[in-house]
Image (cartoon, grey):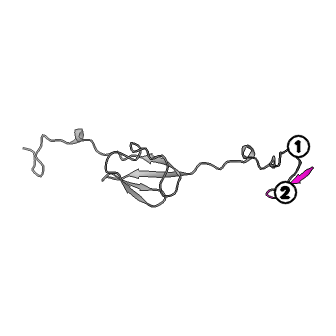
Amino acid sequence: MTNTCLKCGSEWKSEGSGSECPGCKPESVQLAEPRVCTWSEDDDGNWSTACGNSYCMEAGTPKENEYAYCPTCGARIEYIEHVGVSDDDDDDDEPRGEEPR
């Protein structure tokens, strides 16, 4: 028996119960590049997303809270964590607002 796929138009001969088009089987489908939503942290610890939203974590980072996919757009999250100035860079020996003597 010859079958014609309604999806792609290809024809194949089925043997037994094989009614699935060999050209449309999942293993033959070309997968698209995975989507990525970049999340970046601001100075206040809030996270802005590439899909145009913002998130605030009450504790920890989104990664620490096991966010792997963006809840808004469904894409895999790529994190850009904020790199701030460390406390070691402050010169606490000098009073602020006064000239050194």
How far from the left and from the top, in percent, is residue 27?
A: 73, 43
Q: In this view, does 54 lie to the left or right of 93?
A: right
The residue most toward the bottom is 52
- The answer to whether 19 is drawn above or below residue 88 in the figure is below
The residue most toward the front is 17
Q: Give the numbered dot on residue 52.
A: none
- What amino acid type should be assigned to the residue bearing mark 1? Glu
Q: What stretch is highlighted in magenta?
A: 1-7
Find numbered disc 2 in the image and state the secondary structure of the residue it sits on: loop
Identity of the residue drawn at 10% across and 49% down = 99
Q: Give the numbered dot on residue 15.
A: 1
In terms of depth relative to the viewer, which is nearer, 32 or 21? 21
Instruction: Identify residue for label 2.
Output: 9
How far from the left and from the top, in percent, is residue 49?
A: 44, 56
The quarter in which the C terminus is drawn is: top left
Q: In this view, does 33 lie to the left or right of 9?
A: left
Few, some or many residues within 10 Å of mark 2 (<14, 14–19, 20+): few
Disc nearest the viewer among 1 and 2: 1
